[in-house]
Amino acid sequence: MSDDSTKPTDDTKQKKAKVDKKQQQIDELTLDLQRTRADFENYRKRGEADRAATYQHGQAAAIKKLLPVIDTIERAIAHVPSELADNKWALGIIGLSKNLEKTLQGLDLQKIDASAGAKFNPELHEAVQFDEETEGDEEVIAEELQSGYLYNGTPLRHAMVKVTRK
């Protein structure tokens, strides 16, 4: 009879060991699945970020190619003869410039402030001329030579300026 009483406990131990082993396999597979899901989510997010960065890079490259055209339009408007100031064609060109400016603002392109008297900022402005004869503690812009632009808050092209001291 002692053999019969020990046998069920051995079966119970074996069954418990099998259940424990199966539970351990389930836990390992669950962890693997969680890691795989996390890896896939990270991959998806990285892919979205890469697509967005590629789109912005392409858009910035296209805008950069348009900047010389914008510069030419600005120079033409700045040099309109006074006798043509009320000419409909000249006013149309000025309107075209304003329309282009609004469109570019919609693309998150902003002109860098480089007006005379503005504080010189080397992160936004490129000093191509410097007035050595002036004295002062603060460097300010004397004249904007070429417009600069920010795209999504970062400089796409620095403003070329003449700097003086104040």
Image: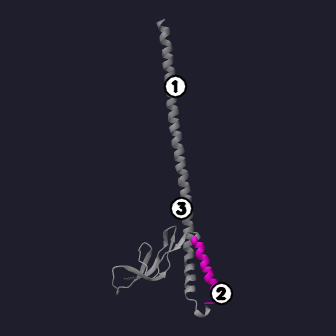
Q: Give the residue type that dot 2 points to.
A: Trp
Task: Quote the CA–CA distance across marks 3 and 2.
Answer: 40 Å
* Residue lying farthest to the top in this orientation: 1
Label 1 environment density (alpha carbons within 10 Å; few <14, some 14–19, many ≥20)? few
Q: Which residue is mark 2?
A: 89
Instruction: Count up the numbered dots.
Output: 3
Label 3 environment density (alpha carbons within 10 Å; few <14, some 14–19, many ≥20)? few
Q: In the structure shown, which secondary structural element does the residue marked by tag 1 occupy?
A: helix
Q: Give the residue type that dot 1 points to.
A: Val
State the residue in front, 141 or 67.
141
Where 130 falls versus 38 (above or below)? below
Residue depicted at 62% across the width and 80% down the height: 96
If the image is split into quadrants, where does the C terminus sit? bottom left
The question of residue 91 being in magenta is answered with: yes
Tell me which numbered mark, 3 or 1, is placed earlier along the sequence: 1
State the residue in front, 165 or 32.
165
Q: Is residue 118 left or right of residue 71?
A: left
The question of residue 38 being in magenta is answered with: no
Q: Is residue 116 left or right of residue 85?
A: left
Q: Which residue is mark 1?
A: 19
Instruction: Name the chief secondary structure element in magenta.
Output: helix
* Residue lying farthest to the bottom in this orientation: 83
On the image, the x and y values in percent for residue 105 come to 57, 72
Tell me which numbered mark, 1 or 2, is placed earlier along the sequence: 1
Tell me which numbered mark, 3 or 2, is placed earlier along the sequence: 3
Q: Give the residue type that dot 3 points to.
A: Ala
State the residue in front, 148 or 98.
98
On the image, the x and y values in percent for residue 35 come to 51, 42
Q: Which residue is mark 3?
A: 53
* Bounds of the magenta segment: 85-105
Q: In the structure shown, which secondary structural element does the residue marked by tag 2 occupy?
A: helix
